[in-house]
């Protein structure tokens, strides 16, 4: 059975920020678990 890789990645669940539930844009820094807003609050 062949799986189209584009379809495969499209079906992956979106990352969600565990703090506020925002969807997280995939970034180079994939170790980041929280959204930009929550990270900014922490640094404040
Ligand atoms: Zn957040």
Image (cartoon, grey):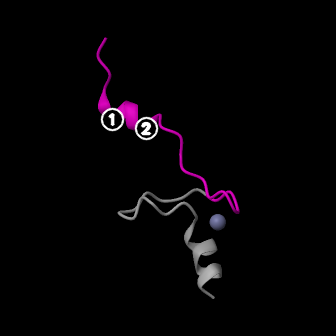
Q: Quadrant of the N terminus?
A: top left
The answer to whether marks 1 and 2 mark residues whose Cβ atoms lie closer than 8 Å is yes
Point out the stretch of residues depicted in magenta.
Answer: 1-22
Image location (x, y in percent) of residue 22: 64, 59
Q: Report how far apart the C-alphas of labels 1 and 2 lie in the structure.
A: 6 Å
Considering only vertical position in the picture, is 42 above or below 33? below
Q: Secondary structure at mark 2?
A: helix
In the picture, the disc for residue 6 is 1
Q: Is 40 above or below relative to 19? A: below
Query: In the image, residue 8 lies at what x, y percent?
Result: 39, 31
The numbered mark at residue 10 is 2
Q: Quadrant of ligand 1?
A: bottom right
Task: Please check the rendered image and state whether residue 2 is part of the magenta-colored stretch, yes or no.
Answer: yes
The residue at 63%/80% (across/down) is 42
Please tell me whether residue 12 belongs to the stretch shown in magenta: yes
Q: Main secondary structure of the magenta part?
A: loop
Q: Secondary structure at mark 1?
A: helix
Determine whether 11 is above or below 2 in the image: below
Q: Residue at x 65, y 80 (%)?
A: 41
């Amino acid at each position: 059975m062949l799986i189209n890789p584009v379809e495969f990645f499209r079906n992956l669940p979106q990352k969600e920020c565990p703090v506020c539930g925002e969807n997280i844009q995939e970034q180079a820094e994939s170790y980041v678990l929280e959204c930009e807003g929550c990270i900014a609050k922490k640094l404040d």
